[in-house]
Image (tube, helix red, strand yellow):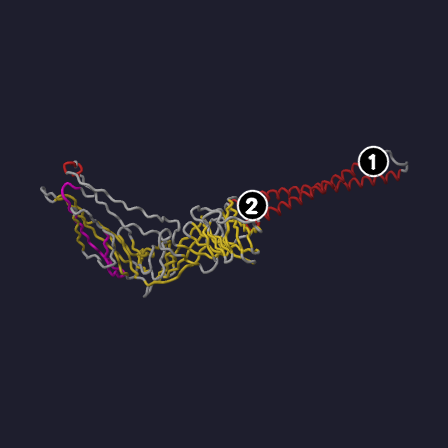
Amino acid sequence: MKSFILAVASILPTAVLADTFDVPTRIDSVVVYPSIAEVRREIVFEAPAGRHTLRFVAPASEFEDILPQIELPDGVTLMSYRVIQSRPPVLGELAGPDVIAARDTLENLERAIADKDAESAAIHREIAAIQTQMTFLETLGSGQPVGTDLDHLRAVLGWMGEETQALAATQTEAHARLAALSEEREELLDDLADAEQALDYLIAEIPDLATIELVLDLSDDGEQSLFFTDFRGGVDWRPVYDLNLVTGPAPHVTVAVSAIVTQETGEDWTGVALGLATVFPMSDNYIRRPYAWRRTIVEERQISTASDTMQMEPVIVEESAAPHPLENGLPRIISIPNRVDLRSGSDVLQVELEHFETEVDLFALGVTGEGTGFRAVTFINTSPNVVLEGSAIMKVDGALVGAGEMPLLASGEDTELLFGRLQGLLISSLTTDELEGTDGYFSRSNHDRSAWSLTVENLTGEDWPLRLRTGVSYSTHEDLVIEYDFSQPPYTGPDAPERRGVIEWRHPLAAGDTYVIDLVETMEWPEGFQLR
């Protein structure tokens, strides 16, 4: 199958056309990127050999920078391509099942109203005929009596009275039927107004459409199949995680990875092959020019005293966060094995992507200022795939304990995950000494001394390997000297916290025990400076 990217409206001069075919399209597959989707439509038609125009309707292009792509079978040559940017009538299969159903409802109501109008007209004719008969009887009764036979006259008058009563009853019954029809018609008119509003809403949700015309040259007779691919906005997907910590002698975490997919393209996706892309195709693909700095020197006397004596605050440069995998880098398309349905603007599709489990180190984590500790694990990504950043549901032995975030992890990379608070692990911090001043009357060095005590009480009823963390002062200024004195040495292993100013202790804490750390922090700096 040949593939063409359409860069111009006309590829070759168009010859005299044999036939024009209006054909439907079917969405065969969709690759969902962050915020946009690559929609691949299949077009099946049958035509004799020769040159023909293929005409179909598709949503108008939203991205001028991304040109549609056409895949042609062998023996079919694309001669020209034209887009008519208009909105064709929403008819037939192009309207979608909801619009078709709404149109059918509207037409049925219009027919029902027409039937009521026809019944009303018939009743009006019936009433008019009755009125004519009654007028005739009145005219007959007002004329000269026929003959002088009293019995005959009495019989005629009786017959006229009976006929008049029968006609009046029939007229009353006809008026009653007419009133009932009028009420029914009013109800149908209300239903018609609702149906028109519903149809207008559905049509408003349909995207602006364009007519696509392809001039093709076919070398053989028979059925042909081609594909038309373009990009649509109004879509989104994100990974979600279900993490279950299984405790016991061999603690491990089971990981269920799913994807949440939504779309508001104005088209329903029915039976499509779905792919999920982890890279944003519209990301910046331009490199910046490197800039050089022109440096020079000047005599010291040209530099102002103010510049000489000005002190510059140290600048701390933190490491920038890794780019989100759904925006930059880590290109991968995840193929969903089964075809899916996803209606525009109403459905939320969840599909399972992966399931794996990994052994973990389970411990109790305490951080000063939190009040209670956390159940925590060191989690290693044992999947061969990259774990993408996303929201997570956290469970312990199947019980929900909270929600969290899964960070971006390469295969084999580790992170720390929290699985709920340990309400029975109590953490407190108490300041025992604080002093700021000078050493003696003639001292030129200022100093600050702080002492405090960290206490962890284990009231959980379980033994826990404890990791206790606290923050201390740190400096990037060589004249600010900071010294520490701890009652227990901090942990300095390869997996110790890397963040400056964070210190950790590790200690096995039995049920009912208390762990105490005493800290003394001393800072000294030259005279003429202030501590900040």
Region of the chain picked out in magenta, as a range:
501-529
Where disc 2 sits, the SS reads loop
| Residue at image coords 19%, 52% | 519
Residue 74: image location, x then y, percent: 50, 58
Residue 420: image location, x then y, percent: 34, 56
Q: Which residue is mark 1?
A: 141
Q: Residues within 10 Å of mark 1 (few under 14, many from 20)?
A: some
The extreme left residue here reads 442
Q: Quadrant of residue 163?
A: top right
Q: Would residue 177 appear left or right of 30 to someone viewing this image? A: right
| Residue at image coords 33%, 63% | 359
Mark sitting earlier along the chain (1/2): 2
| Residue at image coords 78%, 40% | 165
Where disc 1 sits, the SS reads helix
Q: Which residue is mark 2?
A: 89
Amino acid bearing label 1 = Gly
Judging depth in this view, the residue of 71 and 442 nearest the camera is: 71
The secondary structure making up most of the magenta span is strand
Amino acid bearing label 2 = Pro
Q: Would residue 182 appear left or right of 277 to someone viewing this image? A: right
Judging depth in this view, the residue of 491 and 88 nearest the camera is: 88
Q: Would residue 101 appear left or right of 254 to someone viewing this image? A: right
